[in-house]
Image: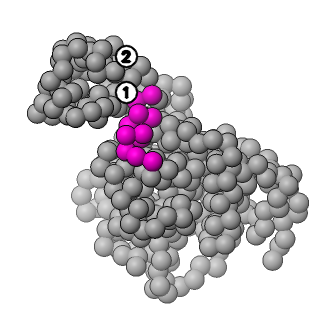
Amino acid sequence: MFSAALLAPASPEDGALLAELLSLPTEGRFPPLQLTPQRKKEKTFDALLRQLEDLARQGPVLMLFEDVHWIDPSSRELLDLVIERVPLLPVLLLLTFRPEFQPPWTGQAHVTVLVLNRLDRREGAALVQRVVGTGELPSDVVAEIIERTDGVPLFVEELTKAVLESGNAKTVLSRAAATALNVPATLHASLMARLDRLGSTVKEVAQVGAVLGREFSYELLAAVAQRNAADLNGALDQLVGAGLVFCRGTRPLATYLFKHALVQDAAYGTLLRAKRQELHKRVADVLEEKWTEITDAQPELLAHHFQEAGIGRARSITGKRREGPPWPELPLGKPCRTLPVRSTAAGDLATSPAVPNG
């Protein structure tokens, strides 16, 4: 059941908009929304901005947007609106993005850009020790980790965890020879090794999640994975425990997020083509059967899965076509590679048979 406990006070319409945005059941608590997709998006943005303003009136707010270089158009539109409001509110907004992203907000009086350099050897060694905890790695192993990770914090964390997980922890920490520890040469190899060590069931669940997107819901995962609840829950708990996936909420309403897009890519990349296509088709079929409101609102998401299933233009996308800019992705599952997928899926829609109007 949708709870407003974590939200600032909201009108019934705002509550309905936010519940729909988060794919939360309302059990008739809010009135139905009779809005065009474009108008619904505008009102949802207004509701989110009111939430920010109301929370800021209660106390200072820290707001985070990570990996803005991968932002989708609708989220970017919302972010633009937030940045306009920030000077008037007690809000600290932090954005992270790669150097190739060119933010349009630089030059404004209330915007400061900080360049985060790579970790030096001392900082890298400190991060390795933080991951290791109360134990200790031989100095030559630490040096090899630092050398191979090139000062990238995520790489340092993942390679260190791969070393620790490569065998019995006490044995690993007591070995002095770096060659005996078999430090993976690349981050991808490290992530693959960690997935393999978790077992075939956990790896398969991670693969299904990777097909759904970097963020996905438990309900959609369960419908696509076709595993019993005990196996599925156990696999998810192991992924969370290994720090490869984050969990928000409680099952069955929980959503999951891969720690980094590289983790998702590693799991996705292990799928053979036939299996990958089978899973994409299964996702598309489940969405059409059980989540028609999502396929109506996000036809490009459905087109993406049909295209990756090898069906592409041969399949007509049914349901009403949306007006206006793309709607923000819901946590049922985001495309694996957001920006390229959005453009190719949109192209398929443009060339698919006419979409019925009713």
- Residue 95 versus residue 121: which sits nearer the camera? 121
- Residue 43 versus residue 31: which sits nearer the camera? 31
Q: Is residue 286 magenta?
A: no
Type of amino acid under label 2: Arg
Q: Residue 148 carries which label?
A: 2
Q: In which quarter of the image is the N terminus?
A: bottom left
Type of amino acid under label 1: Phe
- Going 30% across and 14% down the picture, which residue do you hit? 179
Query: Closer to the N terminus: mark 2 or mark 1?
Result: 2
- Residue 118 versus residue 132: which sits nearer the camera? 132
Instruction: Choose top left, top right, bottom left or bottom right for residue 232.
Output: bottom left
Image position of 76 with respect to 165: above or below: below
Q: Do the residues labelled 2 and 1 touch (CB within 8 Å)?
A: yes
Q: How crowded is mark 2: few (under 14 residues within 10 Å), some or many (20 or more)?
A: some
Q: Residues within 10 Å of mark 1 (few under 14, many from 20)?
A: many
Camera sees residue 304: no
**At which x and y percent is residue 185?**
41, 19
- Going 32% across and 45% down the picture, which residue do you hit? 242
Which residue matches tag 1?
155
Q: How far apart are marks 2 and 1 (CA)?
A: 8 Å
Q: In which quarter of the image is the C terminus?
A: bottom right
- Going 45% across and 34% down the picture, which residue do you hit? 192
**At which x and y percent is residue 151?**
34, 19
Colour scheme of the rendered structure? one colour
Side (left or right) of 303 relative to 211: right
Query: Which stretch is magenta?
Result: 189-200
Q: Helix or strand or loop: what does disc 2 sit on?
A: helix
